[in-house]
Image (cartoon, helix red, strand yellow):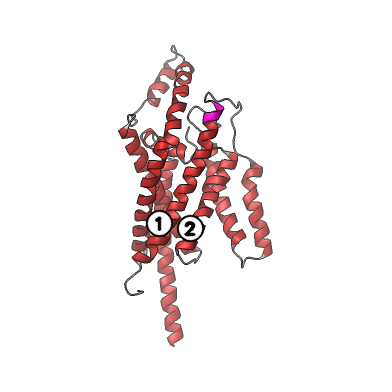
Amino acid sequence: MANTTASVIRTTERSDALRAAGVALLLGLGLIFLTGFAYPEVIHNAAHDTRHSLSFPCH
Amino acid sequence: MLTRILSVGLLAGLLAGLLIAAVQHVTTTPLILVAETYEKPAEASATPPHSHQGADAHEHGEGWKPADGMPRFFFTAITTVATAVGVAFVLMAAMVFAGVPIDERRALAWSIAGFVACGLAPAAGLAPELPGSAAGDLVGRQLWWVGTAIATAIGLWAFLRADHHPLVRLGAIVLLLAPHVIGAPHPHELESKVPAEVAAQFTALSLVVQALLWALVGIGIGLLWPKFAPKSAG
């Protein structure tokens, strides 16, 4: 019984961690897309030197 | 958990990004400014003065951009910090997905793998380039870059996990090589107006800056993760 409870808690913790990781992954990819890949000219020009410096394809 | 990942990511990304912005300011940015002096005459001659379409396109290309000096440094610093925060989020998400405990040694090891996936492997096909360098179609190169980074990241993970079956590891090697067998989209003419010495120096510096960024983000995550442990666990 104690084992079951512990494993239920562990499963809940794990699914909570996976959900948090999913959100963090989307946020992180969104940020990298904006700074490294997005086409709007204002974003491109603001991020220009960073894109070159970190070797994102720029032009 | 989400608060912990976001707090550590924001802080590690901010610290790493600010340090890298300072490094960029004295390494890569001066070379970009040198390269732009070679790029401008080419742009002017590429736009036929009598073509209305060409003139419009040229005007469009002259939209807002940060002025040279402090504004340019400021925007470069902001976007570098944003990239570093993004890298930190993705790195921690990957470690949580893989079920790897986050500590100093592992965070640094994963960040080095991240640099191999997003820095070294794409650079093998598309060398970090300066403005004015000859280059193929942008969307094609971006797609190849992203595909290579994802394939290399999954390939490294599948190959380096000790408990993986030899067949999985064989598949990992195929995945690691595939982007390079397919090949990056390259320009038809390998012509650049930037002197080779400047371009070579930039390529090397860019890889060093990227390696530093990933390593600093990894070190930051490793150091900060225990500090944001939930109270009940401590």
The answer to which image quadrant residue B90 occupies is bottom left
At mark 1, the secondary structure is: helix
Residue A25 can be seen, yes or no = no
Q: Residue at x 45, y 59 (%)?
A: B93
Query: What kind of residue is marked 1?
Result: Gly
The residue labelled by disc 2 is B108
Q: Residue at x 60, y 39 (%)?
A: B184
Q: Is residue B108 above or below residue A31?
A: below
Q: Which residues are magenta?
A: B194-198
Q: Residue at x 54, y 43 (%)?
A: B145
The residue labelled by disc 1 is B220
Residue at the far bottom: name it: A1
Magenta stretch, overall SS: helix
In this rendered view, identify the residue nearer to me: B67 or A39: B67
Is B100 part of what is drawn in magenta? no
Counting from the top left corner in percent of width and height, residue B182 is at 64, 42
Badge 1 or badge 2: first in the primary sequence: 2
Counting from the top left corner in percent of width and height, residue A2 is at 43, 87
The answer to which image quadrant residue A38 occupies is top left
In this rendered view, identify the residue nearer to me: A5 or B111: B111
Query: What kind of residue is marked 2?
Result: Leu
Q: Is residue B140 left or right of residue B27?
A: right
Q: Quadrant of the N terminus of chain B?
A: bottom left
Chain hosting mark 2: B
- Number of callouts: 2
Counting from the top left corner in percent of width and height, residue B194 is at 52, 25
Q: Residues within 10 Å of mark 1 (few under 14, many from 20)?
A: many
Q: CA distance from mark 1 to mark 2?
A: 9 Å
